[in-house]
Each structure stands twice: as structure tokens, then as C-alpha cells.
Image (cartoon, rainbow, N blue to C red):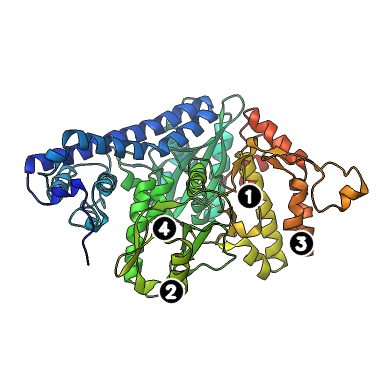
Amino acid sequence: MKQPMRRASDRLLNRDDSADSAAIALAIQSGFDRHYALFRYNAQQAKGRFEIGDWHAIRKLARERIAFYDDRVREAIERINVSFGDSQLAVGNWQQVKRHYVNLLAEHRQPELAETFFNSVCSKLLHRTYFHNDFIFVRPAVATDYLDSDPPSYRSYYPAKEGLEAAMRHMIVDFGLACPFEDIDRDLALATQTLLEFLQSDGQAPADTQIHVLRTLFFRNKGAYLIGRYIQDGELVPFAMAILQDSRRRLYVDTFLCGVERIEALFNFSRAYFMVDMEVPSAYVRFLKTLMPTKPESELYTMLGLHKQGKTLFYRDLLHHLRHSSDPFVIAPGIKGLVMGVFTLPSFPYVFKIIKDTRRKDISREFIQKQYQLVKFHDRVGRMADTWEYANVPIPKSRIDPALEQELRETAPSIIEDDGDSLVVKHVYIERRMVPLNMYLERADDAQRERAIIEYGDAIKQMVAADIFPGDMLYKNFGVTRQGRVVFYDYDEVAYVTDCKFRRIPPPRTPEDEMSSEPWYTVGPNDVFPEEFGTFLLGDPRVRELFMKHHADLLDAAFWQEKQARIRDGQLEDVFPYPESLRFKNRYPCV
């Protein structure tokens, strides 16, 4: 096979200069260390903003942090280009650079993240033919199995010695929050009762009982979450305590969540990332993995705000899965999109989405990518699927269904490159696979249909609360997760609610107006007429009845206008990552 044209920096491969290689390695490590210091400072700021109730600042911190990584990668590349321009860069050797880099990570507290940072820098300097373990970290070089911070990443408490409620009191005090609780005795009694009910226990803790709690709080939106595990007789119960703030800046425990299912909902891939101050992130992920054994580490790192590490681990999981499976990539089931092509590997629970060259909507590739970025930087409130974005992904031709290969070549030739044994996809989004809502409704029984319609309307309302208008509200643009949640995943028409103009359809002026196939009123580029939603959504009488029962307000422009007004006034509505029925205020209304 003919070798591709090499970049100037690829001359690094041909000669040997240990001093330059060591200096390049140090420049990359310094870039990463600066990135992670800023990452931790961001989480430390989140704690301060939570204590003073500055919710808009917390959202701003969350948005700003997403761009940190790419900014530091660019800085590292600029530093290398300035210090080791073509004349000097040519004397280096990337294999030596990697060896020096591994040595620098011997006592590092975030080696796995630093390896990913190295890969990110190298991917901008080397041709993809060098993307193998001789030059980048396809496999990790530094183990993190027993790596931990000093002091350790979690604290331990002993209910058998001091009592369960006292142990819970100590674990809250140890976080050192700078504002008082409204009624800590009431909250501790509720939390203790909830845990004992879940354990079906009389409160007598055996001598070996322990409570382990991660050392720092998890911040997101208006909430701070204490994450821990209760261990008794070798059995482990995951738990999370949600701490909120009232209008007088007093804290209260809103709920105490127990069990794997409830904790997984907190870390759902459709929610905004947590802000957590971690010296050793691998220790946090190792702890979380004991709470959620089936959740991939790639998603745990991502939900901790370390989405580039999540991408690295996901890609390793994909390569591993390809080696241990034989089924082909196929066109994903469902109605084909006007803008995106979607394919999947049936044995792997994800879908791969590409932007078509031939689109039945007059929008540019750049606009679509901007839409995906908008969602990435926004609070997804548990209702918009997160995505990993990749470039130059090789897929073995032997694993591609002929119908899919033909469709890729016909609809997206500009992003497909034939590389001999593989098709290289130059740009792809990857997200969790869901059942398209339209398909789900077709085969649902009565109870499932009602739950799905309730979820569908709730999804839209929660997106609206976060200032997101989905644009195209057809059922095919929503998916149903394994847990039965409805999640939106088609972003090419997403807009801010505050940018839309929601209007009622004016009454016809004459009988001719009423019979006309064309509107008798002017329609601006941002005009939205909620009354029209029913035309596209409520053709099935069974669906119409349920929709009108639970979500008729979505067809009323007044609903949307009222939400707009609240957002413009700076009000941030509460969207909880747990059912309303679990909130303590429902057990004691005085909360």
C-alpha cells in the first residue's frame, strides 16, 4: 500500500536526540499539569459558589470547564512548535518522547489522564498511520489499580461504635460546608430511617459495619451530592445524599438515595457533568465502580467532567469488543434522518452518527457541528443524549454490512476514506443506543404507552426549563432508555427557548382564509405556533387521549411564553435526578 504523505513533524521518527525528546515530553507533561490544576480549581470554585447560592455562576463554571482541555492541548502544541520548530523538531524521536514521558509519570497522581493528553497532542502532530502503541498510548503504560491520594480518597465511619445517626452527622460535618443547616436533626433522622428501611434492618449494626464516603462533594446545578457506600456482612449498599439550599441560604437534605438503580440515575449519560475536586481521579472511579458495577469506566470518567478520558476508554472498549465479536455494523433501525446517517453494531450498545453530504435540509455541516457543541456545553437535565465525537475512526471492511457500506459511500463520501482493509470515518458522533420512541409506541401495551407519553412530555418540559427548544418534536427524534426514560437525540433544529417567538394562530379573517392551504398570517423565521404540534404528534387516537390528559399545555402558546418569562428573569427551575416522590418534603411538608 502506498505510504501517505508525511507531515514535516513526522521527521521526528527518523533521527535520535535524547535531550530534545526529553524536553518535548516535559513540555507535554507541563501542559497537562496546567490543565488539571485549572480543572481542580474549577471544582473548588463550585463549592464556594454553592455555599453562597450563586447558581448561574455554577452553570458558567460547568460550561467553561468543557473547553479547558482543548485549550491546553493547543497551548502545548504551540509551545512545541515554537521551541522545536521544523529544524529542531526533526532531530527528535517520538518513541523516545513516549519513553521519557512514561518516566515522568512514575509518581504522578493522574497518569491515565496524562497519557490521554499525550495522545491528544500527538494526534495533532503525527499522521494516523503512527497511531499505535509504539508512539501513543493505545494501551496504558502506568497502572492505577492501587493508586490513591494522601489522605485517602474516602473517609470511613463505624456505626457499630457510635450509632448510625451519629456516623451520618460526622460525615456531613467533615465536608466543612460554610453555611448552616435548617434542621440537621430532622434531616439525619429522615436519612437514617430511609437507609434502615432499605436495609430492612432494626438498626443494630454488626461489628464489621462501615460507611465509606468519598472525600469531596459532587456539585451540579443547585445540588451538592455526598456519595458513599454502606458495608455490612460483606454486602455493599450504594447511597447518595442530596443537599440543597433554601431561600435563606440554609442547607437541607432533600433526599437519601439507596441502591444501584438510584445511583446510576445520578450518573446518567444524559445529564450534565459533575464538578468534583479529585487529586486521584482513578481512585474515585474505582470507588464508583463498586457502586455501579455494570456502568463502563468510560461513562464514569465522562460524568466526572473528564470526557477526554472517557473517549479514550470507550475507544479501547470498542477495539476490545471488535476482537471478541463477529457481528457486522449495520444501518440502525428506525426512520432514516434527513441530516444524519446512523449505524450500529448490534452486540455493542451504542450508535454511530455521521453527517450526510446529501442532506434534505438546507443547513451546513458546520452548523450541525455547532448544534452538537451547543448541547455539549449546555445542561442536558437528563433529557438530551451526550455524545463522544471522534475523528478518523477505522472500521474493518469485513465487519461492515454491504448495505451500510453502500449507504456510507453514497450519502457521505467526503468523510469516508478507503484505507485498504478498513473504511476510515473522518468524523463521527457516538452515543448510547435507545429504542426510537415512534417504534416503542407502535409495540407498547396500554400501560407502557401512557408511561412513554408522560415521559415524552416531561422530557420536553425539562428541556424547556433549561432554555432548550427541541425544534423537531417528532417521536422519531426521541429514544427510550433501558430504564424507560425518554431522551432527545436529534439536535439540528435545537434552539434556545428565549430566541423563539411563541404565537397563537390568529383567527381567519374570511371563510376563504380558513379554507386556504397557505397561512393567512405572516410567519417570521423564529415564530413557533404550539397549536400546530398536534397535527404532527397526535394522529393516533390512543396517543392523543394520553397526551391531552397529561400534557395539553404544550399546545398552548401561553405555556411557552410563561417559561420564556421565567428564564429571562433569571429563574433556574429545579430538575431533580430522582423522582419527586423520594423528596423528604413529601414526608414532612415543613421541609
* Marks 1/4: CA–CA distance: 35 Å
How far separated are the C-alphas under marks 4 and 2?
20 Å
Query: Mark 4 or 3 closer to N-term?
Result: 4
On the image, the x and y values in percent for residue 489 come to 55, 54
Going from the N terminus, do you reach mark 2 or mark 1 first? 2
Outermost residue toward the right in this view: 511
Mark 4–mark 3 contact, CB under 8 Å? no
The 10 Å Cα crowd at callout 1, few under 14, some 14 to 19, many 20 or more, is: many
Indicate the amino acid at tag 2.
Asp
Mark toward the viewer: 4 or 2 = 4
* Secondary structure at numbered mark 1: helix
For the N terminus, the image quarter is bottom left
| Residue 200 sits in quarter | bottom right
Upstream in sequence: badge 2 or badge 3: 2
Packing grade of label 2 (10 A; few <14, some 14-19, many >=20) is some
Q: Camera-side residue: 357 or 458?
A: 357
Which residue position is annotated with label 2? Answer: 401
Mark positioned earlier in the residue sequence (1 or 3):
1
* Other residues around mark 4 within 10 Å, as few (<14) / some (14–19) / many (≥20): some
Which residue is nearer to you in this view: 80 or 25? 80
Q: Residue at x 16, y 37 (%)?
A: 84
Cα gap from disc 2 to disc 1, whole angstroms? 34 Å
Label 3: which residue?
Answer: 539
Q: Which residue is mark 4?
A: 414
* Pointer 1 residue: 459
Residue 400 vs residue 448, the one in the foreground: 400
- On the rendered image, what quadrant is the C terminus found in? top right
Q: Earlier in the sequence, mark 1 or mark 4?
A: 4
